[in-house]
Each structure stands twice: as C-alpha cells, then as structure tokens.
Amino acid sequence: MDLAPLVELRGVTKVYREGESERVVLRGVDVSVARGEFLALLGRSGSGKSTLLNLISGIDAPTTGDILVDGTAVALLSESERTRFRRHRIGFVFQFFNLIPTLTVLENLLLPLEMIGRAGAAARAEAETLLHEVALADRRRAYPDRLSGGEQQRIAVARALVHDPELILADEPTGNLDGESAGVVLALLARLSRERKKTVIAATHSAEVAGVASRLLVLRDGRLAPA
Amino acid sequence: MTSFLRPSILRRASLRSLTLHPWQVGLSVLGIALGVAVVLAVDLANTTARDAFALFADTIAGRATHVIVGGPSGVPEDVYRRLRVELGVRPSAPVVERDVSAPAYPGVAFHLLGVDPFAEPPFRSLGNPETPGGLRPLAILLTRPNSVLVARDTARRLRIAAGDDLVIRVGIAHRRLTVVGELTPADELSAQAFESLLLTDIATAQELLSMGGRLSRIDLIVAPGAAARETLARIGAVLPAGVDVVSARARADAVEQLTRAFRVNLSALSLLALVVGLFLVYNAMTFSVVQRRELFGVLRALGVGRREVFILVLGEALAIGIVATLLGVGLGIVLGHGLVRLVARTINDLYATITVSSLAVSPGALARAVALGIAGTVVAAIAPALEATVTSPRAVLARSVIERRARRAAPRLGLLGVVTVGAGWGILRMPGGGMPAAYAGLFAFLLGAALLTPVATILLVAGIRAVAGRALGMPARMAAGAVVQTLSRTSVALAALTIAVAATVGIGIMIQSFRETVVRWLEASLQADVYVSSPSLVSNRPDATLDPALAARLVSAPGVAHANRLRAVRVPSPGGAVQLVALDADARGYRGFRLKAGNANTLRDDLAAGAVVVSEPFAYRRHLDVGSRVRLRTDRGEHDFAVAAVYYDYGSSEGTVLMSRAVYDRLWDDREISSLGLYAAPGVDVEALVASLRARAGADADVLIRSNRALRTASLAVFDRTFAVTIVLRHLATIVAFLGVLSALTALVLERSREVAILRAQGFTPREVWRLVTGQTAVMGLVAGVLAIPVGIGLALVLVFVINQRSFGWTLELEVPARVLAQAVLLSVGAAVLAGLYPARRLSRLGLPEALRGE
C-alpha cells in the first residue's frame, strides 16, 4: 500500500473580499488525507467546509498555502488544467444531487465516462454495473425528476464513482434527505468507496456521516482540529 | 475532449433542455422565423421586380449594343435611311414603341412595339409567331393595317384569340387593332419577357402613336474593337442636333439605378425586422443561460471546460437558428408572393411599367436568407454563450449577490450606452458617409439604447413604484419592485422589448412624417382650382399628352379665369435621361414653389432669362446648387442651363428640372401639352366648374379633369400605395415585437414559480397571485413601452434625416404622432398583460408542495 498521503494541505488560507471588508474563512489549514481514508469534516454552516472542498478540487484557489493531490499542486494549474484534473481525478456528490435533468439516469452515469474519452459497450457496462450496485438498474431510462431524493443521491454516488477517480468529495451528501434515505446513501458511499479503495472527504453536519468515517475533523474559526 | 461533437451525451442534454420549455423556444423560433421571412420576402420581391424589368428591357433592346435616341420628338426617320444607305450600317433596326392601355382590360399595361420585320433578325428573338392558316405572321403585319401579335400567355390570360379586335388607348384617343396571331415564347423566361407585349410593324406603330416620320429609337449592333469608336464617330457625325447615340447597357442601367434607392430602403427596413428578431434570440438565449446557471456550475465542477460550455450554448442557438430559418424560408416565400405585387405596383406608380406574373424564387436569395438567419442567430448567442462560460463552478452564487452585481453594473452599462450612442451619432455625422455608415450608426444607436435600458429601468420603476404603491398598496409595490430586484434577468428582456417596440415606433413616425410632408407640399404646390391631364400608366410621370384642340376648348370654357400649361417629358443629357417640366404660367403658377435654395422673388425672371430650377432629389443626386449648371441635349444641340433655385418636390425620387415653356419652345420642337392647371373665375364654384368642363370635353374624351381636392386625394392614394410595403413591414415588426414581449415575460414569470408559491404559503389567494403576476408583467410592459418612445423617436430621426435623405435626397419634416406613441405603449402593455395570464393561471393552480420544492 502506498503510504504517501493522497491529499495534503499546507498553511492554506482563504480570504473573501466583500466590498470594502474581508472575511477570513480558512486560517493556515494543515492536513493530510491518506489513500483509502474516509475523512468527515464537521462544522457549523458557514464554517468553511464547502470552501475547503472547493479548494481541493481546484474549483477555487487559496489565498495562500499549498494544496497537493497525489503530488499535483492544484493551485498552480491553469484553468483548463484544473478542469481536466477534476474531470479525471475527482468525483463529486452534492447536497442537492445536481443530476443533469435533461439526461436519463443511465446517461447521467455515461457523461463522466464520455468526458474522459470512454464510450461504447465497455463504458455502458461499467455504468450498468454501478446501477446494479446502487439498486437502481430498473430506473436506467428514467429522468431524474421521476426519482425520489434518496434515489437521486444514490445515482449521484454512482456518478461520482463511475469514472474511477482517486478522490470523492461529498458536500453534505445527506443534507437534503430523510433519515432512512440518508442511511441508505451513506452506507452505499461507505461500502463502494471501501470496496473500490477510494479516498472520501465529506463535509457534513450529520452524526451518521461521522459514524462511518475513519477520521473526524472539525472546522472552527477557520482552523481544523480533531473532533 | 474539445471537439464540438463530443461528448454526445452533453449535446443530447443541451438539445433536450430546449424541449423542456417548448413555448419559450417556440416563440423564439417564430420571432426569428418572421425576421428571416421578412428579409427573404423583400429580397425575392425586389429581385423579381428588378429581373422582370431587366428581362423586359433585354427583350425590347435585344442584342443591341448601342441605341440612337432623341428628345421628346424622337428620332427623325431620315436618320435610319442615312445610316443604312449612306453609311452602310446594316445591323440597325428602327423601333417605335410606347406603353399603352386597353379600356377593356383595366389595370393591364401593354407595351406596343413597332419593328421592321426585315431589320429584326440580328436583334430580337421574338419567338415563333403563329398565325391561323399558317400564313407568315410578319407578312400579315406588313400587309394588314392595324394588326398586332400578342404574347401567347397574355392572349390566354385575357382570352384574346386571333381575329379578335383589341381597342387600345393612346393619349386620349382610342385605336382599334386586330389580333392576327400569337408570339410563342421559346422558353419560360421568354414567356415572362413577352408578357404584355403587342408586336406590330413600324408603320402601324407610327400611325397609332401619331409619330409619322419619326422613330422612338434606332437599335445598333456595333462590333467591339478598335473599329467601334470610328463607326460610332461616323454615325455621330450624321446625327441631327438633339439626337445621340448611347450605350444600350447604360440606358438599361438607368432604370435599375432609379429603383435602387427604393429597393435598398425596403431591404433596410426588412433587416430592421431581422435585427429585432435577433435581439429576441439574444434575450431568449441569455435567459436560458441565466436559468441554467446552476446546471452550468455543476457541469464545470464535473470537469466540463469553458470552451465546451461555450460550444454547447452556441450549438443550441444553431439548432434554433436552423429550425427558425427553415420555417422563415417557407414563410418568406408565401409572404413574397404578396409583397411582389405591392413592390411591382409601387415601381409602376413611381418609375416604370413592369409586369410581374409570378414570384421568382432565386437560389441566391434563399442562400442569403439562410446564411443571415443562421449566422445571425449564432452571433446573437455569442454574448450569452460567453456568459455561460464564466459561470463559477463554485456551485451557485447566491441569487442576491448576482442581483446586487447587476444593479451595481447598471450605471456603468448606462455610461457605455451613452458612449455607444455618441459613437453612432459620430458615424452618422461622418462627412461622406454613405448608406453603410448610416446603417452602422443606426446599429450603434440601437446597441447604445439597449445598454442604457437597465439604468433607465431602475429610474422608471422607482417612479412607478412610488405612484402605484401610493394608489394600490403593497401588492403594487411588490409587483414594481420585483422588476428591479431581478434586474439580471429583466434587464435583457426589457432591452430586447424596448428595441422591438421602438422599431415599430421608428417606422411609424417615419411613414407619418413622410405623409405629412407630402400633404403640406401638395397643399402648397397645387395652386390651381382644376387640373386636366391625360391618364398615364405611370402615375408620377405625366408624359401622356393632351389633344391641343381639347386643351384650347377647356381653357376657353366659361368660368375659367386663367390657365397654366405644363409639359413633362424625358430628355437626354450626358448623365442620362432627365425628367424635364416646361411651365407656362403667370405669377400664380409660381406661388406653389417652396425653395430650399435661391430667391423666390426673382424666380420667374430667372426662368424667363433661360435658367432652370431643379428639385431637391435632382440637386442631391447630381451634387448641384444655385449657380451650378445642368447640361441637356436639346433639339438644337447640347445646352448648359444655370440653376437659379432648388425647390422642394416629393413627386419624383429621380428628380426634375423645371424651365419656362418659352425657353423649352426655343430649344425643342415638341409643342405638346401634358396637363393644364385652370383657375376658376371669382365666384365660380369649383365642383360645378369641373362638371361643366367634363361636359365640354365630351363623354368619349379619355381625359382626367379633377378638382384641386380630388387631385390631392389621388396623389395621397398613390403615396399610400407606395408605402403599402413599408406598412406591411411595420406590421410584421410589430408581430415580432409582440411575440418577443410574450415569450420573454412568460419565461420570466414562470421562472419565479417558487417565489410565488412562498407567497401562496404565506396566505396569498390565487386571485391575489394573479394580480401580482399580471401587475408585474404590466409594469415591465409599461417600462418597455415608455423606453421605446425616446428610442423610437431617435430611430425615426435616423430614418428620416439620414437614411431617407441619403437614399432619395428628400428633406422631410419630422412628425411625431401621439397615435403611434400610444400604440407602442398599448402594444407593449397589452402583450405584457397577455404574457402574464398563462403563468398566473398556472401558478395560481400549482400545488403548493410541488411549487415550494422548485422546478
């Protein structure tokens, strides 16, 4: 097993300008996330959890500090390099599912594969396998608006995994689900990431998420601390 | 993965998103389709009319390279004899021709063409004349007096058969002809060219047209090369004064040039309809991007690049453009069938007689419309596509942040708008700027106006909110306030609507200004009480003549105190044929002239001394002013005339030169009269005088005797016919604007269903929701309508004082009718309220849980 951390943040600070004033969201965050680890980021609303995920994925850039994902300094990449980086190496699970409403369930899964140049029967088989894994194979032709919230989030989990990224970033993955659905989605995320040896960083309020994580960190006043 | 074709799933998602809002996409498609249809219809109508004329001119001119022409009296017959006998110019053919009408076929213009059958073969291919009994038709023409051949299609259409009599009207006389056979065209093209042709031999034509010893022209074929110049010089040497040899091509081009301004103007107005359509596409695409900001954010987070998002949006526009353009092409062809008749009628009224029997759908016009529709749609979508690429992948920005940014950007955009309008003004004022500069300036003006819309909306809504809030309370304040609170979405829609409605205002004011100017001009220039003329096939070319005996009888009628005599002819000049008017009048006859330049007090003396006055369009076209000189070819040779004044005249876009009859008589041999202006003796009732003059002329006399008022009414009828095409275009622009208001506002309201559901949850009744929603759309309609007024007036200023001036050379007085402005506001508010009805109904019926969850 490779012992080098997959994600490494060193002295990461993020400051937002709001008109004349500044709001410091992250203050010198240092953290390492090992391969295969399931890290839960806890914290109140507005504490900077989502910001941290955005920085790791290259969606946003830090004000200061370094972010390394599998040895790649994300912040130093150009805009198009960061886009390609996300396309190949990150899987996202959002709070509001954010499936593409004009694509069927199966097409939503095929999209990340097509974007990395994998199309055809093999890609389709991969997507079908994951649909079976999330127990929604019979809904492959349905559009997202025909699915319940729990079902949509299961598809979102499958979409995050389908193109085989090293890192899954989940932003409040159960934040918009009832207790039962949340439990199902969470169990699915934990099982699939474990089976496929994926690293997961999940921002959450939820105690259930915390329950399946291998490590818990709390973001408070812009700093990370063990829970 | 940067190619447009990949990933196919992304493309599929994008195209499916179009089908999610079929009404929104449908109305956009209809808007652009109408724009394309208008452009194509005008293009087809213009091309058909122009080609009809060119084809006819080619048939009449045949393969002639040069033409010998004379003044109003034509060419002496002796010239032809000298050409053939003395100079040995064999490829020459005499022609006697004129447009004539037939009382039995009102509205049909015939062209009587008298030729010498023996000289014809190298010149014209007149098909295969067929006569019953197999007699050689040309032989019949020569041997049987007053016989004619009629084009086969014309004969069938009018049910004329060989052996029938055909009575034609020449001036005020009626002449009986015998149809002896048909001209069978060799192909479809010739069939169109032969339409309306009456072929006869030259002697018959001379007799029918009272042109004994004279010819209309002599056609020549001069082989190109070094010898051509020498041949032409030899021919020129034997020509009498007032007779000249000119290039056949230049002669045919003259009418093409004449009608060009008219056609260009129509094309410009049709393009305006397309610009309105494109603004609506811009609005629809921007809206669709703003609506999907969240989706683009997700796609960007998943690794979709900016370029792919850009191509995705452009691809959607391309799909809309293709569908809309195909629909527009179909609509355009249908519309073209109607427009071509209006265009042909206007050209008949103003310039020359043409017959158009069907619309020619040229591949070139289709290609232009397709290119314009598709490329225009894609260009209109570039800005929204760029907007989509800057969507942050940081999921979605808070809506309030976006709206705050939009409000903050409004003053900056306004400033940019002022600069753009200023740049447009600069382009319009550019010395030497032609029509392209005029259209560039016009476009900059419209763009600037669109940029000014957000800041103007903020100011206007503040006023509406205060007034409506005081009168109608909280719901009214909410309805008005929502327009500014959602400025990121409403401002683009409002800009598009303002431009759309402004286009209808601009064209409306332009037409009304033109009409009012003509009304005032007619009031001032028609000084006599009764006007007498011979019916003419081309309304504004009174070149038909009055019978001198009849004229004398009318002038000496009881109740007539005084008469002006007017002769209108076309005379040659080195710069092409010129419309000349010779006036024999006392001081009263000159009172009607309103001068743009020159001294009105000395006008009569100047004319008596041999000077001329020229109309404003003539001065504009030939760059003349007081003191310049005009060279005309008279029957005594070329002569320079000093320009004493420039007068306002809206009767001819070609322009007119006016001189005293005494001067005309000294320099031309023509002694005909075209029309009379009669002054009633004091105390004589004008209508009674008209009746007595008609009685004096006799029931058979084909002469128009009209009171001042009747002539004015008839002239305005011609004006209204001339503008029929423009009015149709304005109506179409109005429909496009209406569709725009409808689609933009329906989309905006539906998009706010969640917000409305929150109000319902808080206790708003369905009726209150309905009032709120329609109130909001009404406010937007009002804002667009009110903003469209200054923009429309600005557009009218450009149309009236720049584009019209550069096209025709006319100075018009700006007339801003309250009716046009009220129509604009009503159109805008009416369409807006209508746009609110469907969403209001849908939203008030929407299940609350469903609506609260959002779309």
Image (tube, rainbow, N blue to C red):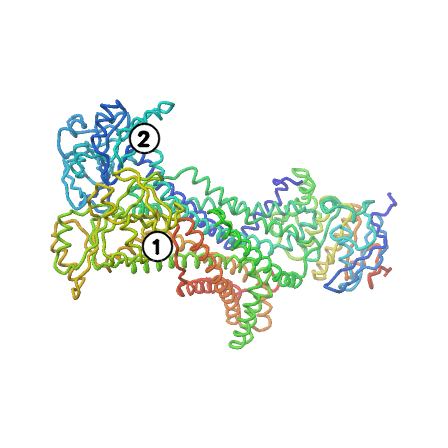
Secondary structure under tag 1 reads loop
x%, y% of residue B523?
29, 60
Secondary structure under tag 2 reads strand
Between A166 and B789, the residue placed more toward the observer is B789
- Given the image, on which type of amino acid does mark 1 rest? Tyr
Is residue B41 visible in this depiction of the protein? no
Location of the N terminus of chain B by quadrant is top right
Name which residue lies at 64% across and 45% down.
B308
Residue tagged 2: B66
Residue tagged 1: B648
In this image, B117 relative to B769: left or right?
left
In this image, A91 relative to B484: left or right?
right
Between A111 and B6, the residue placed more toward the observer is B6
Between circles 2 and 1, the one closer to the viewer is 1
- Residue B284 appears in which quarter of the rendering? bottom right
Name which residue lies at 75% across and 61% down.
A17
Q: Residues within 10 Å of mark 1 (few under 14, many from 20)?
A: some
Is residue B11 visible in this depiction of the protein? yes
x%, y% of residue B728?
37, 53
Q: Residues within 10 Å of mark 2 (few under 14, many from 20)?
A: many
- Kindly report the distance in space between the C-alpha atoms of the residues bearing marks 2 and 1: 35 Å
